[in-house]
Structures are given as C-alpha cells and as structure tokens.
Amino acid sequence: MANVRIILRKETKKDGTNPLAIRITKDRKSSYIYLEYSVKETDWDTTNQRVKKSHPNSARLNNYLIKKLAEANDNSLELETKKTLVTAKAVSESIKPKTKASLFEQADLYIKRLKEDGKFNRYSADLPRIKHLKEYFKNDIAFSDITLPQLERFKASLKSKNKLSERSAVNHLVVVRSIFSQAIKEGVCDSKYYPFGKDKIKIKFPDSKKVGLSKGDVESIESVELPEQANHARNLWLISFYFAGMRISDVLRLKWSDFQDGRMYYAMGKNTKGDSLKVPDKVMQILKQYEAFKDEENDLIFRELRNIDLNDRFEMERIIASRNGMIDKYLREDVAKAAGIKSPLTMHIARHTFGNISGDKIPIQMLQKLYRHSSITTTIGYQSNFIHKDVDEALNAVIGF
C-alpha cells in the first residue's frame, strides 16, 4: 500500500519559506505533489505533519492540510483497490488536481501564483498585460489553437490600438511565453504548440538608453542645502550610489546590524547574492543623521518599512513601490531643482550614475561583483551603455583633422 505523507520540501524560496508537498511512496519510490502554501522550517512539525502554533495562520493551514491528506489517502486507496499493480507516480497522477488547458484559465493561474509567491512588482506589471491579452482574444482559446500570426497581430495591436512602445509590447509577449511554459509544465499543453524560439517568435528587447549623472552633478547633490523630506530622499539616493547603485528595496531594508567593523553586510533581495562592502566615510556621515531615531524593537535604519511584516513579501514589495514613488517625487521636484540638475533624477538613476562615472576605470570582473550580477555577460552589456572612449576617438580620428 502506498504511504502518503505531508512534508516540507528542502528547497528554500526567496522569502525564507519552504514549499509544502504531499509525498506518495510505493515500493521505495516516491512522487510529490506541491501544495499551494509554504512555511518556514521553524514553523513546521515534521513528526506530526502539521504547522506549529508559531505560524500566524496555523489553524487555517492545518485544516487545509488535513483535508488534502484525506483526499490523497482516499484516492490512493480507491486506485489500489482497482489495480493489482500501482506505482507511486500513478497514485500521484491520480491525486494531482487537473488544471484547464485554455489560455485564460492558465493566465489566471499564472497571476494567482505571482501573488501567492509575494511577487508584487511582477504581479502589478503583468496584471494589465493579461487584461490586454484577454481583450484582444475576447473569448478563451485552447493553446493548440493559438497561431504565430495571431500573436504577431496581438503585438501589432498593442502598438497601434493601445499606443504602447516596442519594449512594452515585447513585455506582453514575455508574459504569454511564461503562460505557455507554465501550461507545458502542468501537462495541459503539448510542447509542440510552444510558439517561441528558433523559426518562431523571438523575444528581442529594443536597446534602451541608460544615462547617468556626471561627477559634478553628484557633488552638487551632496552639497546642496535641503529641507527634511528632500534631504532624506537625497540621503537614500547617495547611499544607493555609494554602494554601486544598490536597489531601493535593499536600501530601505538596511539594518543597523548590517554594519560591522567598518563593513556593510547584506544579501541582495533580487537574487539573494550576499557579500560585504567597505563603508565609505560619506555613508557613515549620513547614518549619523538617523542615530537619534533608532528603534530598540526594530533594527531598520530607515522608517519606510517599520511596522510592516517583512516576511509578507507581497505587502513589503507593495509598500516599497509606494515609498519609491514618493522618494522619486522629492528627487525630481526638490533635489534636482535645488542642485541644478537638468537630467532626470530618480533612485534608479543612482545605479546608472555609478556605471557612468566608473566607465572603463574598473575591471569588468570587479563591476560584476559590485553590481551583484549572476553573469558577466549582463555586466558587459550594462556597462557598454557608459563606455564611449573608443567610439569618441574613432569619430575624432575622422573629423578632428
């Protein structure tokens, strides 16, 4: 008889939780069905197959798990009474919920999972893209009925009817590609219907212009006198710049305990890459402005994320996006104006500014480390936006006389 248990898988997600799954074991071979939820290892009782009371939603989750375990055992028993030879995989396939094989239903599942995984930024960006997809097709459609010309016309419609840029239209196709990949993984779409790749639709983003500020601009930002809120926005921008264009999500999550013995230790939220950097004196001077506001119950340096559950990734990303909008407003309307900056000034420009000033002065391998890029190809592509020396010299050789 198959042994059916609820377990906590060993792979840890970015938010520090591990997925819950049903494990079906038969004849020493196991198969797994992933459930909809994940919890931290410290909140899981392995012996009793239940969520500990330390989890805020333990009662609700345990009721859900009891129901799923009962369903799995019932299905397993029913299948084994009908057949003399039953494998763990067969039991697993009989228990797995069958998802629908249509575009709209898979799109709904895709956006639902983004929210469950706490990916607010992707959720908020992809939700209107799925809306456009449904508006274009009007009626739900099977994956096997989706043609390459249809998707090409969808892209053209986005640019003509919805007045979207080439890049935005391509982002819509990226969502369609993700939905197809999900459907294939779920087993509801044959891979032969996948419309992307060689001799099919190719995802190619148009070159984007990345412009950073000059060294003189940064010096103006550093020295200008500003009122309280604008000064705070300036401080966040400078810390991002001083740490090689640290993302706003990582700046706002900085804690006093991240700074030890003159170094700053942190793991980047986007890809969890961890390292440490020497803390420049300029950063220490900024941090001194916040020492008087230390919260003994909260280690966060800045106030934006205080009083929210940092383990709730979706809510945290939502708050960061909201706060980033307000910070950018102060940068554009107050800091840039006071400092005499004519170029656009936002938190993201801090990263471009570091790239612009570093130019070709820093070895590309070191820039990869500073940027926390997984691939050096990404670093080369990014930094190429700011290296103009060879091109300038070539042009001058012809017209300089």
Image (tube, rainbow, N blue to C red):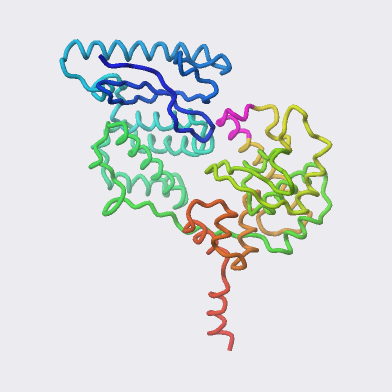
Give how far across and how far down residue 161 sits, in percent: 42, 45
Residue 400 within the magenta-colored segment of the rendering: no
- The quadrant in which residue 323 appears is top right
Q: Residue at x 65, y 55 (%)?
A: 344
Give how far across and how far down residue 371 sits, in percent: 58, 53
Q: Residue at x 68, y 46 (%)?
A: 264
Q: Residue at x 82, y 44 (%)?
A: 288
Q: Which residues are magenta?
A: 309-319
Q: Nearer the viewer, residue 83 or 382?
A: 83
Q: Residue at x 67, y 60 (%)?
A: 213
Q: Nearer the viewer, residue 38 or 41?
A: 41
Q: Is residue 24 above or below residue 117?
A: above
Q: Nearer the viewer, residue 149 or 57?
A: 57
Give how far across and how far down residue 154 sits, in percent: 35, 44
**Which image quarter is the C terminus in?**
bottom right
| In this picture, residue 99 sits left or right of residue 212 | left
> Which secondary structure class fits the magenta region best?
helix
**Which image quarter is the N terminus in?**
top left
Give how far across and how far down residue 53 sits, in percent: 56, 14
Q: Is residue 23 above or below residue 103?
A: above
| In this picture, residue 4 sits left or right of residue 41 | left
Q: Is residue 291 above or below residue 353?
A: above
